[in-house]
């Protein structure tokens, strides 16, 4: 293992696909890493590589200076911070929390205020990119918080991010993440409708995807998603239930800022139905074959 970087003690809570890849990059960079996850077995590979284990989120706060977290949704975030053995139950003076979960911006603003009152600080730093980018260290961090906290976070974020953008105060990093995701999610729904028309007309799905990818109608991520759309891979970069959650947060953010979101609302309906029909754990590209299958059964 590399020499510890200035003996900096880092904590990481939440070891899903993205969280695990980020934590592994931190460990490989030589930091003194302690991890927590609701299911300990998901941390075993990291523990075998030298990471320490915290029995509770509170143990992370007690033993670490900078604490990353990346969990599923707002409920999981709030429970992790505010439960009896949560992150906020210990002394927070001088602690820096880097929240990377994609959640409602209002949740970030609320947590930032609570942490500030206890002498700590929080920045929101959701990322743009996939698990592959996390493993390569080429994510883009979208950061919200004060200048001092942002400067403190950048050296450790640089272990898995190629670029770090300071968007504004706490919560704005999350808004920017939703701004990035919203058109892509709406595009996937529009693509589903368009391709369903083509399939009903007897045009080969694979050929249509290739034509679209080569045309101005294709967005950058489309070629990467073609295997998932064709159901030729089981790899999941981001699942359908995750998009459902993000769309709900996009609509909530729109309501907060007084912006109507009819396109996001109809897209959310499609993803909600897909989750209800058992497609929630599939890659979000699978929303296309899901919609086509429903159309063909009509």
Image: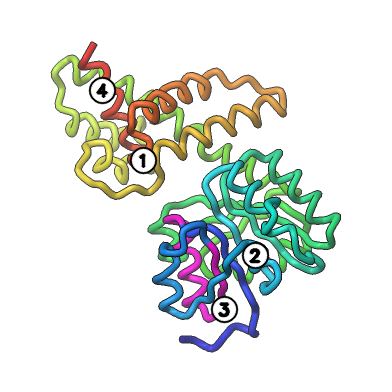
Assess whether mark 1 and mark 2 are in contact (beta carbons under 8 angstroms). Answer: no
- Residue 67's disc number: 2
Let me know if residue 188 is in the magenta part. Answer: no
Helix, strand or loop at label 2? It is strand
Mark in the foreground, 1 or 3: 1
Let me know if residue 21 is in the magenta part. Answer: yes
Helix, strand or loop at label 3? It is loop
Assess whether mark 3 and mark 1 are in contact (beta carbons under 8 angstroms). Answer: no
Measured in 3D between alpha carbons, the distance from the residue under mark 2 to the one under mark 1, in whole angstroms, is 28 Å
Crowd rating for badge 3 (residues with CA inside 10 Å; few <14, some 14–19, many 20+): many
Residue farthest toward the top in the current orientation of the protein = 298
Residue drawn at 57 percent across, 85 percent down: 4
- Residue 259's disc number: none
- Residue 31's disc number: 3
Measured in 3D between alpha carbons, the distance from the residue under mark 3 to the one under mark 4, in whole angstroms, is 47 Å
- Front residue of this view, candidates 230 and 92: 92
Residue 105 seen in the figure? yes
Identify the residue under disc 1.
281
Residue farthest toward the bottom in the current orientation of the protein = 3
State which quarter of the image contains the C terminus: top left
The range drawn in magenta is 16-36
Identify the residue under disc 4.
292
């Amino acid at each position: 293992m590399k020499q510890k970087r200035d003996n900096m003690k880092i904590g990481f809570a939440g070891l899903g696909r993205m969280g695990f890849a980020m934590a592994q990059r931190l460990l490989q960079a030589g930091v003194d890493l302690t991890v927590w996850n609701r299911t300990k077995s998901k941390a075993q590979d990291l523990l075998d590589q030298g990471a320490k284990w915290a029995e509770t989120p509170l143990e992370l706060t007690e033993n670490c200076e900078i604490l990353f977290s990346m969990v599923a949704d707002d409920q999981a975030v709030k429970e992790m911070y505010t439960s009896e053995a949560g992150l906020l139950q210990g002394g927070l003076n001088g602690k820096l929390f880097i929240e990377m979960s994609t959640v409602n911006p209002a949740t970030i603003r609320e947590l930032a205020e609570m942490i500030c009152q206890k002498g700590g600080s929080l920045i929101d730093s959701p990322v743009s990119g996939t698990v592959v980018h996390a493993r390569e260290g080429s994510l883009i961090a979208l950061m919200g918080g004060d200048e001092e906290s942002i400067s403190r976070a950048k050296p450790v974020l640089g272990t898995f991010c190629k670029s770090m953008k300071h968007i504004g105060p706490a919560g704005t990093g999350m808004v920017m993440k939703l701004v990035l995701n919203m058109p892509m999610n709406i595009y996937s729904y529009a693509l589903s409708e368009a391709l369903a028309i083509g399939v009903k007309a007897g045009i080969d799905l694979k050929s249509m995807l290739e034509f679209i990818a080569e045309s101005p109608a294709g967005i950058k991520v489309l070629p990467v998603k073609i295997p998932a759309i064709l159901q030729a891979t089981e790899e999941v970069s981001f699942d359908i239930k995750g998009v459902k959650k993000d769309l709900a947060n996009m609509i909530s953010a729109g309501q907060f800022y007084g912006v109507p979101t009819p396109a996001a609302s109809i897209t959310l309906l499609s993803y909600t139905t897909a989750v209800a029909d058992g497609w929630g754990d599939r890659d979000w590209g699978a929303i296309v074959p899901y919609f086509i299958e429903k159309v063909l059964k009509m």
